Image: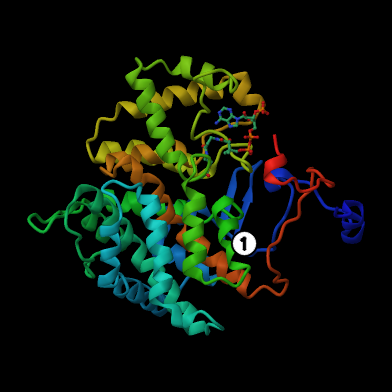
Amino acid sequence: AIDITTLRSSTGYITFDPGYVSTGSCQSDITFLDGEKGILLYRGIPIEQLAEKSNFIETAFLLIYGHLPNRSELDYFQYHITHHSMVHESIKKLYDGFPNNPHPMAVCSAVVGALATFYQDQFNNQTAREIEITIHRLLAKLPTIAAYSYKKSLGQPFLYPQNHLSYTKNFLNMMFATPCEPYEVNPVAAKALDVLLMLHADHEQNCSTSTVRLVGSSRCNLYSSVSAGIYALWGPLHGGANQAVVEMLQKIQDEGGDAKKFVEKAKKPNEEGSSRLFGFGHRVYKNFDPRSKIIKQMAHEVLDKLKVQEPLLDIALQLEEIALKDDYFISKKLYPNVDFYSGIIYKALRIPVNMFPVMFAIGRLPGWIAHWVELQGDKDFRIGRPRQIYQGKTSHDYVPLEQRG
Ligand code: ACO
């Protein structure tokens, strides 16, 4: 048998920190958050200022390159992101192999992973220029890949990106136009989507970003690292929460709209039929998530401007009011997070519910890229390799099949 005692003493002490609650995995200059005060800064700039004054492309540049771009840097970045938005024609054939209605997160991750098969010449010792092209390609192609996954679910033909449109207008056009019918993208919808993407663009060492860093720490290429990040984001405790919120609100509405009853159930996690209050709680924020404040305000404005009546917003407002006065949520410091109101806006933009996590992925992409790039240049670079505290058997002989009970 392996001598566990020796193994332990030869490697020294191991910190046991389930969920990495108190473990700093890296040093980073990208995003700062103060969970007690509800502060979020991208490269030092408050999220509130960016939401009001910037746009998604500029914010992506800021996160990746560390400073706000000057005019020529922005034009260059914008130009390349626009001009890399088509995908290889062979990529379209991948979609034929998927069943009729797969979850679009699965499709996006698979197709982003497959990009690595198209650009594999660039993997070893990538130059700064090659990494730059990879960044442009990913930012440019993910909206196309995402819109194609929606078109696939409808059985409609894919639409090519339109280079004269902005990033979000182009995405909405690829989603909702058809070859028979042009689609006039509402500027209110395009602007709302742009702000939502910006608010999601980075959030330091969340599950998906840590995944991208961990995969990238094996010096794995950016496409594959991002593909893994998309899968990590998919779960309902992370980026899938925006879908889970709207499904939860819908369920409450279908069952008669009793928000109080749902909150009571959410307080009893061990009872049958209980569900967490999705869109509430956060590992770091023990006060209001600053993004949720902006999104809540936006939800009212967008619904108003688009003249959308959304009963789910009323249910969300009731849930929030009840939960914020409830001792359970107060004592556990559970507040609305970024996902609580975002789904209501996506719904008003006619984005289908199963595409909500995909919208999150498009938004989070600059953050993933920024962290992958930062890691590759890190002076403390080491492959990520957590330890474990082994609790299993240490002396157990092999039993031949015929002697087993
Ligand atoms: N509803 C009801 N109870 C909750 C909720 C919730 N939304 N969130 C946490 N709790 C309770 C837990 O049951 C736990 O109670 P206990 O101490 O009695 O066991 C306590 O609050 C602490 O919760 P943990 O799960 O230990 O907190 P953790 O930091 O590990 O998880 C998380 C944070 C995953 C966000 C959690 O709050 C959650 O599941 N929220 C709902 C899903 C969600 O909205 N996810 C999106 C997060 S933001 C993002 O990824 C974009």
Q: Name the colour scheme.
A: rainbow
Which quadrant of the view contains residue 213? bottom right
Residue 370 visible in the snapshot: yes
| Residue type (three-letter) at the residue carrying disc 1 | Leu
Residue 9 lies in quadrant: bottom right
| Residue under the point 51% across and 61% down | 367
Give the percent coordinates (x, y) of residue 54.
Answer: 42, 60
Can residue 314 be seen at all in this image of the molecule?
A: no
Of all residues, the one furthest to the front in this rendering is 402
Q: Is residue 212 above or below residue 258?
A: below
Q: Residue at x 24, y 34 (%)?
A: 308
Q: Outermost residue, left direction?
A: 180
Label 1 residue SS:
helix
The foreground one among 360 and 403 is: 403
Which residue is identified by label 1? Answer: 214
Relative image position of residue 65 (x, y in whole percent): 52, 72
Residue 202 placement (x, y as % from top left): 52, 56
The residue nearer to you, when weighing 29 against 405, is 405
The x and y percentages for residue 244 are 43, 35
Count of number-bearing discs: 1
Asked whether, in this view, residue 340 is left or right of residue 354, the answer is right
In the displayed structure, would residue 375 be above or below residue 291?
below
Assess disc 1: are there few (<14), some (14-19) or many (≥20) residues with their C-alpha within 10 Å of its C-alpha.
many
User: In the image, what residue occupies the spot 65% across and 63% down?
Assistant: 28
